[in-house]
Image (cartoon, helix red, strand yellow):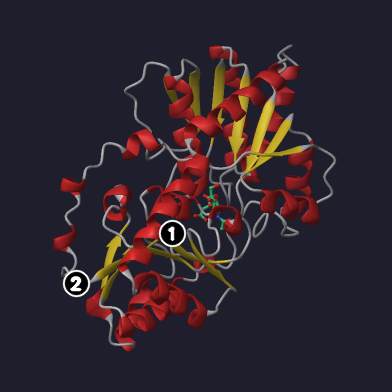
Amino acid sequence: MKIGIVCYPTYGGSGVLATELGMALSLKGHEVHFVTSHQPVKLNFLNPNLFYHEVFMEDYPLFHYQPYELALSSKLVQVVEKYELEILHVHYAIPHAYAAYMAKQMLKQKGIDIPIVTTLHGTDITLVGSHPVYKAAVEFSINNSDMVTTVSESLRSDTLRLFTIYNRIEVIYNFIDFDKQKDWHDDDCLRETLADPDEKIIAHVSNFRPVKRVLDVIKTFYQIQKKIPSKLLMVGDGPDREKTEVLAKKLGIKEKIIFLGKSDEVRKILCFTDLFLLPSETESFGLAALEAMAARTPVISTNTGGLPEVNLQGKTGYLSEVGDIDDMAKNAIYILEDEKRLEDFKDRAYAFAQKFSIENILPKYEKLYELVVK
Ligand code: GMT
């Protein structure tokens, strides 16, 4: 099949997922065309079935904001026509679903009928999409997609609650490619470079936006390190990073926290991590939690959004109310204080992550494509 993929190419769950999906589809013989503003960070061109088309913008003194949707929909028209694409799969509703709808209408006038699959990822519904500024356009694009998917049951319910939807919504969970994990060997795991042998390693990975509640990571770790000798790895960057460093300093634990910034080596970091912290305000799925579990790391998270579908209470980790630092710290200490218990949690986290293996999820997208192309 010839598939066009539209996504945000920078760091962030939806872009990572879309890129991994496109690469996996291309390895299965599909011809995949990425149409994005920049080259997706994780795109690996070692496959002849992969193509990348950059959406160029043309500045003009009259424009206060450059009209990206217009440039994207025009580019989509060109690419669909030139490469005879059979389907467009857009990730993150704003503005991708809207631009794809416009492209579809333009192509209709040329006698081409291209189906559109829209995958909703989270904040495009919960935080940004339902805001009155965007709501009408988002609702319209969802209802006018040929197929809509969400990455969790929870996001499906949120979409139905926040918008008037008359289109069917399928849930297709995010996935993890375990084959890529096999490249990692214990010898690569240079744990001793970061912590003493008696210390546990705790990690958090995110884009440090307010929704991630990174200050709760520091506050939770503050309580943990009082009971368990440990180090905290903070991976990623974003608007709240400075605040976390200030708080860590204020609490006198800065030397126990390593800020690694944005990293392409998250798997390498996770291989020596004992526990993952994800205290988000809202999280439609929590791909970061799944990545941790796939690396045998139990998760302490909040119980918001789709997290209970990924992290199982008392099995793969624990879930607390948003902002309940005491509970998150108590649960983390409970897991870390007993070696056998920690190993059991690690085993169960890894086992449950298999449910989301790419082998289980990819065929669901392929089936969906076949359905809409027919
Ligand atoms: O919140 C992020 O890290 C980025 C954001 C995105 O769309 O790029 O992530 C959302 O999509 C991810 C992939 O489907 C989900 O795993 C995240 O839970 C979701 N983030 C939120 O709902 C806050």
Asked whether 318 or 262 is in front, the reply is 318
Q: Which residue is pictured at 52% across the width and 45% down the height?
A: 14
**Nearer the camera: disc 2 or disc 1:** 2
Q: Amino acid at mark 1?
A: Asn
Q: Is residue 68 above or below residue 113?
A: below
Give percent across and percent down for residue 124.
Answer: 63, 51
Please tell me how crowded label 2 is: few (under 14), some (14-19), or many (20+) other residues with Cα within 10 Å: few
- Horizontal side of 194 relative to 92 (left or right) equals left
Q: Horizontal and vertical percent for residue 234?
A: 33, 65
Task: Name the quarter where the C terminus is drawn.
Answer: top right
Q: Residue at x 38, y 33 (%)?
A: 43
| Residue type beneath disc 2 | Asp
Mark 2 / mark 1, whichever is N-terminal: 2
Q: Secondary structure at mark 1?
A: loop
How far separated are the C-alphas under marks 2 and 1? 30 Å
Decide if ligand 1 comes within 8 Å of the CB at mark 1.
yes
Left or right of 41? Residue 255 is left
In the rendered image of this protein, does residue 148 appear above or below residue 232? above
Q: Are marks 2 and 1 in contact (CB under 8 Å)?
A: no
Q: Position of residue 121 (x, y in %)?
A: 60, 47
**Residue 93, image x, y percentages:** 65, 43
Say which residue label 2 marks.
198
User: Pointer 1: what residue?
Assistant: 207
Q: Residue furthest front?
A: 340
Viewer can see residue 367: yes
